[in-house]
Amino acid sequence: MPVEWTDDELDRIGEAEELEIASLRRDGELSTPRTIWVVRVGDGIYVRSVNGPGSDWYRSTRVRQEGRVEAAGADKDVTILDADPELNGHVDDAYRSKYGHYAARIIQAITSPEASSTTMRLLPR
């Protein structure tokens, strides 16, 4: 049976300003954690690379599609999956709503087609 986020984890991670993510390398060790933005859409936790698919941290998530995240005291091993592209509009809206107090250019970057192409869903393991 697949593991699901608890309501508490969804709330804590979804409300956190930032998330630390470390991907699992080929040798089984975790990479150096990277601080990124995170949003919740329904019962899903989503992240994306503001710099698009060329970002080192994004490319490292593609190796094993596993890692570890920490946000607001929620510390969890995760599977890192490509999100359904049909959800990108909802994820964009979540980024705009949560981070709209930042400069417009920053919000435009995180909701750009390049960033949207890297949208990933985090599933607990």
Image: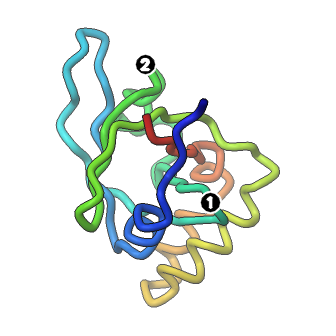
Judge left or right: residue 95 versus residue 34. Answer: right
| Quarter of the C terminus within the rendering | top left
Against 2, is 21 above or below?
below
**Does the CB distance between marks 1 and 2 fall below 8 Å?**
no
Quadrant in the picture for residue 78: top left
Q: Residue at x 52, y 83 (%)?
A: 104
What residue would you read off at disc 1? 43
Q: Residue at x 45, y 41 (%)?
A: 124
Judge left or right: residue 69 versus residue 113. Answer: left
Mark closer to the chain start, 1 or 2: 1
For label 1, the SS is loop
Expressed as whole percent of the image width and height from the top left, the position of residue 83 reads: 66, 43
Expressed as whole percent of the image width and height from the top left, the position of residue 117 reads: 65, 44
For label 2, the SS is helix
Quadrant in the picture for residue 33: top left
Against 84, is 5 above or below?
below
Q: How are the colours assigned in the image?
A: rainbow
- Label 1 is placed on what type of residue? Asp
Q: Label 2 neighbourhood size at 10 Å, few (<14), some (14-19), many (20+)? A: some
C-alpha span from label 1 to label 2: 23 Å
Q: Residue at x 58, y 83 (%)?
A: 97
Query: Given the current orientation, which residue lies at the most extreme top position?
Result: 27
Residue mark closest to the camera, 1 vs 2? 1
Q: Label 1 neighbourhood size at 10 Å, few (<14), some (14-19), many (20+)? A: few
Expressed as whole percent of the image width and height from the top left, the position of residue 39 reads: 52, 65
Expressed as whole percent of the image width and height from the top left, the position of residue 61 reads: 42, 30
Q: Residue at x 28, y 38 (%)?
A: 22
- Label 2 is placed on what type of residue? Arg
What residue would you read off at disc 2? 64
